[in-house]
């Protein structure tokens, strides 16, 4: 069998269930983010059975795929809609995250035409400088949005730690809560969603529940308020069990729900140091080579077209030496290998994303 991504649904369910439970203590619901799974209906079902109340994806294509597979959870498009996709978005997504009035007006028109109501979450800029309305402009935006036909203003949200790595903390989360209160007061409403952020918000909620220790801090943190924040959008934490701020494992979660497996196509005793005059390689200047003398070099039939090879961790005993479009090169060290053997790798978010979206990688779901 060719390159494959083994997906352990039981481990993903476990991770989702634990996070849903831990957050519910704080009155926070979970939107399961499916974008790294290419909108996998099987994974969406697992999220739902673990207690996730909504699903979110950045791509309408993925949302369509899940809806067509009869996934029943409410769907949010978590990237601002493209004007060129408005009709599809109104048809398949219940809610979308928005920052531009022009786009919301187009959603309103399209929703009116087909007799639907489309939910709007307004994203607020809190410093990471990706999407978001500047906080001082949110009130005026809400004033315009609530007047639009076939549009339901659902609430506000923010996203940090994606472009610039700005950490969610008491200060920026309090700013979002204060804004929610002031908008509710101004318009005499109670917005239903205040979506504080993504997996990188977990540490702010739990105050140190990663395996780095600090469990007493986590307990103390449990009494500390999370303000108006009543929703988080979780992808990486559920799928890979890690805190994106430092990529440390989150306590009691599986970090090996996904494994990439490649097949050995060459195994030879070779020098570790290249010879001949050298220029750039396929992907620019390769990192300097450590001369280890002769080694047992393994060639695997997976490469950059199948995954982000920088995001792979080989099973123990193997050393990653390099990669190109179609190959990974390992030092087998003491391992005995035969042609056709399989070697498996742990994956980070980037490797997972690329493998899920590669047509060359077979996705194999395991219960
Ligand atoms: C990708 C994304 C998420 C999920 O991020 P994770 O770090 O995987 O939890 C949440 N919100 C938005 C807007 C996103 O684009």
Image (spheres, rainbow, N blue to C red):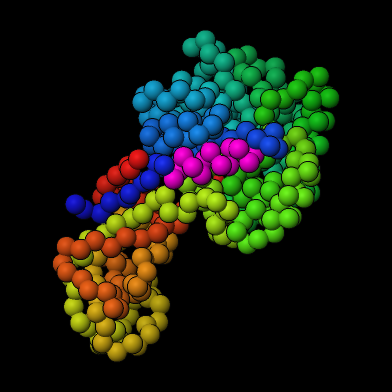
Q: Is residue 359 above or below residue 183?
A: below
Q: Nearer the viewer, residue 146 or 231?
A: 231
Residue 82 in view in this figure: no
Q: Is residue 353 left or right of residue 162?
A: left
Q: Is residue 144 magenta?
A: no
Residues in magenta?
11-23
Return the x and y of residue 152 as percentages of the image width and height: 64, 19
Q: Main secondary structure of the magenta part?
A: helix
The residue under the point 75% across, 34% down is 228
Q: Is residue 16 magenta?
A: yes
The residue under the point 19% across, 52% down is 1
**Residue lying farthest left?**
339
Q: Nearer the viewer, residue 302 or 324?
A: 302
Q: Is residue 319 above or below residue 263?
A: below
Return the x and y of residue 143 as percentages of the image width and height: 75, 23
The residue under the point 43% across, 31% down is 45
């Amino acid at each position: 069998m060719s390159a494959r991504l083994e997906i352990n649904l039981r481990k993903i369910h476990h991770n989702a269930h634990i996070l849903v439970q831990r957050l519910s203590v704080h009155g926070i619901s979970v939107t399961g983010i499916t974008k790294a799974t290419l909108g996998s209906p099987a994974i969406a079902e697992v999220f739902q059975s673990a207690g996730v109340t909504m699903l979110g994806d950045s791509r309408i294509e993925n949302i369509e795929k899940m809806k067509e597979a009869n996934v029943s959870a409410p769907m949010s498009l978590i990237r601002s809609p493209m004007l060129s996709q408005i009709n599809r978005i109104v048809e398949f997504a219940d809610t979308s995250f928005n920052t531009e009035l022009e786009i919301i007006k187009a959603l309103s028109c399209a929703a009116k035409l087909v007799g639907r109501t489309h939910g709007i979450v307004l994203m607020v800029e809190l410093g990471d400088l990706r999407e978001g309305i500047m906080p001082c402009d949110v009130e005026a935006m809400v004033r315009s949005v609530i007047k639009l036909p076939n549009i339901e203003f659902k609430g506000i949200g923010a996203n940090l730690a994606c472009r610039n790595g700005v950490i969610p903390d008491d200060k920026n989360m309090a700013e979002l809560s204060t804004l929610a209160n002031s908008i509710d007061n101004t318009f005499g409403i109670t917005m239903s969603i205040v979506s504080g952020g993504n997996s990188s918000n977990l540490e702010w909620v739990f105050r140190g529940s990663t395996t780095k220790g600090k469990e007493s801090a986590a307990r103390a943190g449990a009494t500390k308020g999370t303000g108006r924040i009543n929703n988080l959008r979780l992808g990486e934490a559920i799928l890979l069990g890690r805190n994106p701020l430092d990529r440390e494992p989150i306590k009691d979660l599986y970090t090996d729900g996904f494994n990439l497996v490649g097949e050995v196509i060459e195994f030879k005793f070779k020098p570790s140091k290249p010879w001949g005059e050298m220029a750039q390689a396929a992907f620019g200047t390769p990192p300097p080579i450590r001369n280890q003398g002769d080694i047992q070099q393994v060639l695997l039939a997976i490469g950059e077209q199948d995954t982000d090879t920088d995001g792979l961790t080989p099973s123990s005993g193997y050393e990653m030496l390099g990669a190109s479009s179609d190959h990974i090169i390992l030092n087998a060290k003491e391992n005995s290998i035969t042609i056709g053997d399989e070697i498996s790798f742990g994956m980070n978010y980037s490797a997972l994303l690329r493998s899920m979206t590669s047509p060359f990688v077979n996705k194999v779901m395991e219960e």
